[in-house]
Image (cartoon, rainbow, N blue to C red):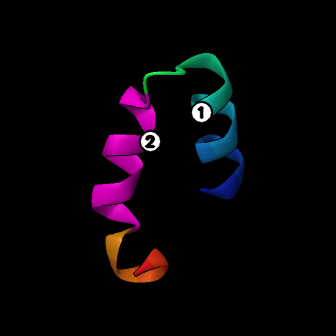
């Protein structure tokens, strides 16, 4: 998941992929 987050962040500066990951990693990151 860490790799996917970084790759998505680099590909989508807007953070579209990060928003989706944040919802799933909301418990882990928060």
Q: Position of residue 11 (x, y in %)?
A: 62, 18
- Distance from the alpha carbon under mark 2 to that under mark 1: 6 Å
Label 2 environment density (alpha carbons within 10 Å; few <14, some 14–19, many ≥20): many
Which numbered disc covers residue 9?
1
Residue found at the very far front of the displayed protein:
14
Q: Position of residue 9 (x, y in %)?
A: 59, 33
- Relative depth, front residue between 26 and 1: 26
Indicate the secondary structure of the residue bearing disc 2: helix
Residue drawn at x 47%, y 76% as measured from the top left? 29
Q: Main secondary structure of the magenta part?
A: helix
Find residue 16 and report its image quarter: top left
Instruction: Report the residue marked by disc 2.
Output: 18
Relative to 9, does residue 20 appear above or below in the rendering?
below
Q: How many marks?
A: 2
Find residue 15 and report its image quarter: top left
- Is residue 22 left or right of 13 when viewed as pictured? left
The part of the chain drawn in magenta is: 15-25
């Amino acid at each position: 998941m860490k790799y996917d987050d970084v790759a998505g962040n680099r590909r989508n500066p807007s953070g579209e992929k990060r928003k989706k990951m944040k919802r799933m990693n909301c418990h882990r990151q928060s």
